[in-house]
Image (cartoon, rainbow, N blue to C red):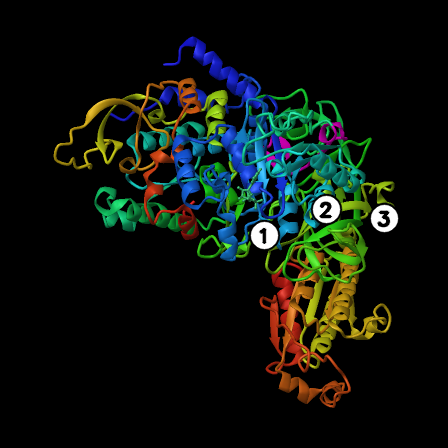
Amino acid sequence: MTETNSSAIKAYAARFGPERGQGRNALSPHLAALEAEAIHIMREVAAEFERPVMLYSIGKDSTVMLHLAMKAFWPAKPPFPFLHIDSLWEFQAMGAFRDELAEALGLDMIVWVNEEGRARKIDPFVHGSALHTQVMRTDGLLQALSAGKYDAAFGGGRRDEEKSRAKERVFSFRNQAHAWDPRNQRPELWRIFNTRIRKGESIRVFPLSNWTEVDIWQYILEEQIPIVPLYFAGERPVVERDGTLIMVDDDRMTLEPGETPRDKKIRFRTLGCYPLTGAVESEAETLEDIVLEMLTARSSERAGRLIDFDEAGSMEKKKREGYF
Amino acid sequence: MADGQTRTEVMERLTRAGEGGVLRFITCGSVDDGKSTLIGRLLYDSKLLFEDQIAVLERDSKTHGTAGEEIDFALLLDGLEAEREQGITIDVAYRFFNTEKRKFIVADTPGHEQYTRNMATGASTADLAIILVDARKGMLTQTRRHTYIASMMDIRHVVLAVNKMDLVDHSRARFHEIVSDYLSIAEDLGFASITPVPISARYGDNIFKRSKAMNWHDGPTLMEHLERVDTQADNEAAFPFRMPVQWVNRPNLDFRGFAGTIAAGSVKPGDEVLVAHSGKTAAVNRIVTADSDLDEASAGQAVTLVLDREIDIARGDMLADPKARPEVSSQFAAEILWMAEEEMLPGRAYLLKAGGQVTPASVTTLKHKLNVNTFEKEPGKSLKLNEIGVCTLNSSKPIAFDPYKDQRETGSFILVDRFTNQTVAAGMIEFSLRRASNVHTHAMDVNKDRRAELKGQKPAVLWFTGLSGAGKSTIANLVERKLAEAGRHTYSLDGDNVRHGLNKDLGFTDADRVENIRRIGEVARLMVDAGLIVTCSFISPFRSERRMVRDLVAEGEFVEVFVDAPLEVCMQRDPKGLYKKAQAGEIKNFTGFDSPYEAPEAPELRIKTAEIEPEQAAEEVIEQLVQRGLLG
Ligand SMILES: Nc1nc2c(ncn2[C@@H]2O[C@H](COP(=O)(O)OP(=O)(O)O)[C@@H](O)[C@H]2O)c(=O)[nH]1
């Protein structure tokens, strides 16, 4: 049965109604500064581009970004659509969360599937994570961006995620082929962003550039933002494969000889395609628990993200190909 | 899981972590001074690394570290150099760490040739600069340069970190020697604080933990200082209110708000605010955020203001304190750092971007260049990559600003090349050249729209470009005649009436041609402002200059007519005998002959005069004007 948190989402949406919710406690000063910076960036994009879009991956960073967009333009709705690239292999709870959230907030949520990939029945268990990610995510994203003729796309990337991201600009320029040309990036000074592009070119924008993982969690906690239930510990069926706990989310997963799914109390520190996302055993059932667990954590977030371990999977390369 | 007590602890720890807000700083040093080691050390000692990262670090330190048996902290951030070798332009990498008191954002810039540009980029958002000096080498030319750039970018606080103290026996005398050398150059640059700290990045001395070997040091450790330094007090909050309008929020007829980030000062409901450009004022009714309406908002906050009356405000306008107004001017002096390979050409139009304001602007004169190593003024005609100069600029539309030294947020701008779209310069405004700040624009009653309305027409520039002898003037004259017959008010500009008067001081070098077109463009713009339809017939061989004129007038008011005839045809026609003279070598730089003609890429209209009669060509121009809604 798919896990949902419908009532939390409804209560959350009510905060953005004409009456607003009760004013919450003031944010921690550093989060207030990061929030203001992200809102500033989003307003710049809304004002300067013709067809912006906000990528929505359903994960915690993306959900924080969406929350900031709700705040940036209130009482108006965000003046752009949201775009989810559905790989067809995400946890079921993610799709449910996305649909409920979009509906409750009244957002224009576009869900894009690479139909060619669907027809070819791309399966991460069979074809490997690299090909699956390439076809369903990277290619899917490029198709969707071209089809929508978007000239600016927000992504939830943070500079602290990975060494190569540390140098990424907030406004990252892409050529006609959506490729990132490292030789052709523009210096960013003060809060003045050069948004000039020619026809067919586009810009990826990262409003969360200066946030760290701790900032994200602390913000979710202080702002009480609903997130996919899978981030919280719960009994879920898993098998252990190559030292990683994989949750059996549907019956497309063929069990290997000797494998029997067992219920374990687990949660996810990052979300994506279920065959590619490792779980951690955890007792953290609330946001406070998660933050506590994280502050004492001993391994980095990406350890749970199998995609980075693929030999051909370096971020740098993916970025050049158009992946975020 | 978390019981009551741990939960409270976590919450307290988190709350404390945020108390000091964010401190942004930049680290500056020459190669091998230990910059990477220092930053790596900060990340490591702030306990931000996870076990898997530390394991990798220890392994890598053994295989390719440069610190012997010790952990080589520099390996935490490598990558910049390798990429530079691949020709990748890395300007700044940002690193993050936090302590119980503050969150820190570090701008790390690779050294070498691109240094000035990179450092300026990192410095533009920094509150503090750490100037790193190798205790063995002492002050270097680079130290002066870094210090100068820090002061130019108006970083208020400097830390002089004297590194590798372990290699000079932790000598107090050596430290003091370097400090006094440093103060002799930096003292007069106007920093709010200069804090010297003797450190050893490799061993962590006086970074997080106080050094035993240097117990003579009675100042703060590096982290004590970074956690405590107050960078807010001296600037934004105390300054008069400024808010550049980013976006007009208009979800329905009942709500009209102006969204923006407060650049300086603070605002309360009831406060009177001024629209800098129009000089109109209104009172603030509400300060709206998605959480609640606020009783007050100040510098750094992103808000939406609702005013008590309807006045014209759009993106690019600045809301300000009416008692302490910003300057509004189209002529000003600024310090400029050139960031592009292609050099800066006085007279050429770039796009100037300041907050939400965008306008074509050109450098009219380069007063002098600045040597970043000696702080001396040097004469110069143009600026190359990484050079700094003091210039006067002229913008097509007036911009609202404060001097950069008073207010970074509202005194800075960038210049963008209109063809490559690259950011080519960073600018810091010094002062307005017209004393416009005293004669604020009063809401004008007779404006362009009114003038055009009185004439019952839409003003426009019809720009005829093409080779000499292509037929520009012939067609333009016919067009003007037809317009006059239809009762329109026109004027015609061409070589005959411009070269003998307004531009008689100009020759035919590239620079003079640029200036020639610039002046004509300005005259045409004034005529459009007066409500006229202006025909201009000039060879105008360069795309960029035609583009410059296009940008001087409003969207849709510029109609480019490419009068296209093959060179052979023009040479054959040769109505003024000029091609013959050019062939004989009597005229130099003749377009099409020994000077290039850049044909328009997307003119509004292209006329092949070898194929049709002038009368028919003029009809086509009129037809264009009708289609574009310029003629009713
Ligand atoms: N003895 C000693 N060596 C240091 C210290 N700080 C850095 N180094 C060494 O100096 C060399 C250059 O350091 P690095 O951080 O790469 O310099 P960068 O070019 O400024 O980033 C490396 O071999 C470091 O291990 C220090 O405090 N003491």
- Frontmost of labels 3 and 2 is 2
Element at label 1: loop
Q: Position of residue B614 (x, y in %)?
A: 67, 79
Please determine whether, in this image, residue B176 is positioned above or below residue B293: below
Is B251 inside the magenta-drawn segment? yes
Observer-nearest residue: A319 or B89?
Answer: B89
Q: Within 8 Å of ligand 1, the CB of disc 3? A: no
Residue B434, which numbered label? Answer: 3
Disc 3 packing (10 Å; few <14; some 14–19; many ≥20): some
What is the C-alpha distance between the residues marked 1 and 3?
A: 30 Å
Q: Where is residue A102 in the image (x, y as percent from the top left)?
A: 41, 31
Question: Residue B61 vs residue B298: left or right?
Answer: left
Is B18 inside the magenta-drawn segment? no
Cβ–Cβ under 8 Å for marks 1 and 2: no
Chain letter of mark 2 equals: B
Magenta residues (range): B234-260
Chain letter of mark 3 equals: B
Q: Which residue is drawn at 36% across and 26% down?
A: A231
What is the C-alpha distance between the residues marked 1 and 2?
A: 35 Å
User: Where, quadrant-wise, is the C terminus of chain B in this rendering?
Assistant: bottom right
Q: Earlier in the sequence, mark 3 or mark 2?
A: 2
Residue B144, which numbered label? Answer: 2
Q: Can residue B489 be seen in this view?
A: no
Chain letter of mark 1 equals: A
Q: Within 8 Å of ligand 1, the CB of disc 2? A: no
The amino acid beneath tag 3 is Arg
Whether labels 1 and 2 share one chain:
no
Residue position marked by numbered label 1 in the rendering: A196
Element at label 3: loop
If the picture is divided into quarters, which one holds ligand 1? Answer: top right
